[in-house]
């Protein structure tokens, strides 16, 4: 037995060490590959502009974009520094997104658990969901004016349907066995919500929130076109009017990196709130 | 596979020969025109361009303002366009491949600063703490900043918003803004709804800040089809002539093109200065190929102003602006 067991034990341990040794390089390898992509992209950019293959009006040199970054950080662009522009945009996005979550998640849960609520609200959601938010913007500006409220509403409306729909899906896909088991143990509706539906549907709801935040983000430039005087989106739009492509590209990079950071934060929050997912 | 390759080569050859054959004649031209009251509407309405080039497909594209026109030019979306002097200064400084070939119009009271009557605004100093709108990068934005500077009023003491002309009209009707410097046909809506004119662009011209719109052509088009640039200039000149000789009929055309009452169209017309084509070759305007006119001076001072506003990186030498102004096509049309 012991003779049989020892050769058995060897391959297992070998397998384990191999897996263990594979795990580390696997992470660093994907990091390496990602770094490679960025490096190749930057190098191509540098070469193309250095060789003069691209019109500088359309594709400025990396150092010009870097200079625009430094200048906007220190001196600012049209009366506000880069951080102030970023702050104005993040404020808009986060407020609108928070509102979309505050309204969208309860609405989605309601529609998920109650067939009547779903029947009542579905036509509204289904009609409004495919509407391009920009089409609504003209109307929003006329109704709410050119101030902050129309911008926030546009971002809010862009984020809402994603959250509602993914919450409905999350709630309806909760295994009814859980619900029945809890009910048979005497769970109230409140208990069901907080101890069955939310924990079970949580991961899917959070995934929906991530997608919805991304969608809100894509509408930012559009929201800041009308009568803003600060914001990353406005900065990009304004610089484009004056053909300052270095500022435009710098703004886009900042926007992209901030988007990645926001998404990482959402993932971090997800892990913190729902370690089981 | 081979069949496909042969087909691809055949298509490519055909495309190549067909473009080569069309060398002397463009298949299609795109004219970007500004949403303004000027003789380009007459030329368009009477089909004068089509008469000059009957077998060319002509496409007219309405463009909201100078900023959009710059983007259209940078994106090579138009063959001909129109630009006010600030966007022109931006375009030349950023080395856009365009030439100025024609004076489209001089801006008088067709562009004005309107202020809300109930806000007691009688001078630029009263704008402190108010909300003012202008399409950024346009002639009126330039004049607004220039006027504030001349009057010694800090632009930071008020809220200056970037809005497209149609959005200004909407925001005005809602009561979101106290003042705006923009142009007809939307200007009138603000004036008729509790507004009065504080200053016109014509008054700023008298103070030494003329504003105008210039017709531009893409360099690539002009190099390939020089005779078609002349045809374009000729058609626009005919439109200007018609405007000057038939004011009543012109007003009817403008009214129809912009869906306006006739009396409004008549008034807006009077606020626009049309320059007869032969006069455009004098020192006050384009000048001649040998001696370029005051348009170059205006471009240099506009660019200088925009550099000081940090909207442009650096002031180019005068020669670059002289190269931009090209009266040669107009000279041929006039016969000089």
Image (cartoon, helix red, strand yellow):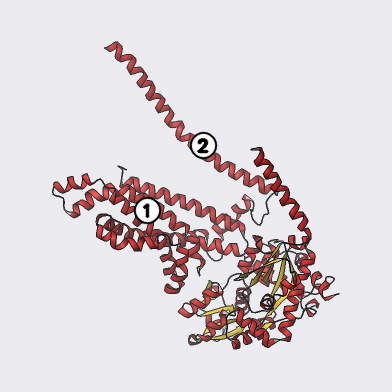
Residue farthest front in this picture: B3
**Which residue is more in the foreground, B1 or B92?**
B1
Q: How many marks?
A: 2
Instruction: Say which quadrant the C terminus of chain A sits in.
Output: top left
Q: Quadrant of the N terminus of chain A?
A: top left
Residue A127 placement (x, y as % from top left)? 38, 62
Q: Is residue A91 visible?
A: no
Q: Chain of mark 2?
A: A
Marks 1 and 2, the one that precedes in the sequence: 2
Q: Is residue A5 left or right of residue A225?
A: left
Q: Position of residue B289 (x, y in %)?
A: 83, 70
In the image, taking residue A256 as reference, residue A105 lies left or right, namely left
Indicate left or right for A74 with B312 as reference. Answer: left
Q: Position of residue B148 (x, y in %)?
A: 60, 77
Up-down relation of residue A43 to residue B284 (above or below): above
Badge number at residue A32: 2
């Amino acid at each position: 037995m012991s003779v049989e067991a020892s050769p058995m034990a060897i391959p297992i341990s070998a397998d384990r060490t191999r897996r263990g040794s594979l795990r580390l390089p696997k992470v660093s390898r994907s990091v390496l590959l990602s770094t490679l992509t960025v490096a190749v992209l930057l190098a191509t950019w540098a070469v193309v502009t250095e060789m003069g293959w691209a019109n500088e009006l359309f594709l400025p040199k990396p150092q010009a974009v870097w200079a625009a970054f430094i200048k906007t950080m220190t001196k600012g662009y049209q009366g506000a520094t880069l951080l102030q522009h970023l702050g104005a945009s993040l404020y808009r996005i986060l407020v609108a997104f928070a509102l979309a979550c505050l309204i969208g998640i309860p609405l989605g849960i309601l529609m998920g658990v109650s067939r009547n609520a779903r029947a009542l609200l579905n036509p509204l959601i289904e009609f409004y969901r495919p509407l391009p938010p920009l089409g609504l913007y003209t109307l929003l500006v006329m109704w709410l004016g050119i101030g902050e409220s129309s911008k926030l509403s546009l971002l809010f409306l862009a984020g809402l349907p994603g959250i509602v729909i993914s919450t409905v899906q999350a709630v309806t896909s909760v295994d009814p066995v859980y619900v029945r088991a809890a009910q048979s143990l005497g769970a109230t509706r409140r208990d069901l919500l907080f101890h069955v539906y939310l924990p079970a549907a949580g991961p899917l709801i959070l995934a929906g929130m991530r997608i919805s935040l991304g969608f809100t983000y894509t509408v930012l430039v559009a929201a800041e076109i009308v009568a803003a005087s600060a914001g990353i989106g406005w900065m990009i739009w304004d610089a484009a009017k004056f053909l300052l492509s270095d500022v435009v590209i710098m703004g886009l990079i900042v926007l992209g990196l901030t988007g990645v950071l926001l998404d990482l934060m959402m993932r971090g929050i997800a892990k913190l709130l729902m370690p089981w997912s | 596979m081979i069949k496909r390759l042969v087909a691809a080569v055949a298509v490519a050859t055909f495309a190549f020969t067909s473009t080569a054959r069309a060398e002397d004649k463009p298949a299609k031209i795109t004219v970007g025109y500004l949403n303004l009251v000027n003789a380009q509407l007459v030329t368009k309405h009477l089909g004068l361009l089509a008469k000059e080039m009957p077998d060319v497909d002509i496409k007219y594209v309405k463009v909201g303002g100078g900023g959009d026109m710059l983007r259209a030019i940078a994106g090579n979306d138009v063959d001909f366009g129109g630009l006010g002097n600030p966007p022109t200064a931006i375009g030349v400084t950023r080395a856009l491949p365009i030439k100025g070939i024609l004076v489209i119009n001089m801006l008088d009271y067709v562009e004005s600063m309107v202020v809300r009557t109930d806000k007691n605004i009688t001078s630029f100093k009263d704008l402190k703490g108010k909300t003012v709108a202008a399409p950024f990068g346009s002639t009126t934005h330039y004049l607004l900043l220039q006027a504030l500077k001349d009057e010694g009023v800090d632009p930071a003491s008020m809220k200056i918003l970037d809005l497209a002309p149609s959005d200004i009209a909407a925001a005005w009707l809602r009561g979101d803004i106290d003042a705006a410097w923009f142009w007809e046909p939307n200007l009138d809506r603000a004036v008729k709804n509790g507004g009065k004119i504080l200053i016109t662009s014509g008054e700023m011209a008298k103070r030494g800040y003329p504003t105008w719109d210039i017709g531009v052509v893409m360099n690539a088009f002009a190099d390939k089809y020089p005779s078609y640039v002349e045809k374009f200039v000729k058609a626009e000149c005919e439109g200007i002539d018609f405007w000057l000789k038939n004011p009543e009929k012109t007003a009817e055309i403008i009214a129809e093109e912009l869906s306006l009452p006739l009396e409004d169209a008549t008034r807006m017309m009077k606020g626009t200065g049309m320059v007869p084509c032969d006069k455009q070759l004098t020192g006050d305007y384009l000048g001649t190929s040998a001696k370029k006119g005051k348009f170059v001076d205006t471009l240099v001072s506009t660019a200088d102003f925009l550099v000081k506003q940090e909207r442009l990186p650096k002031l180019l030498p005068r020669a670059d602006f002289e190269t931009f102004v090209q009266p040669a096509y107009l000279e041929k049309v006039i016969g000089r």
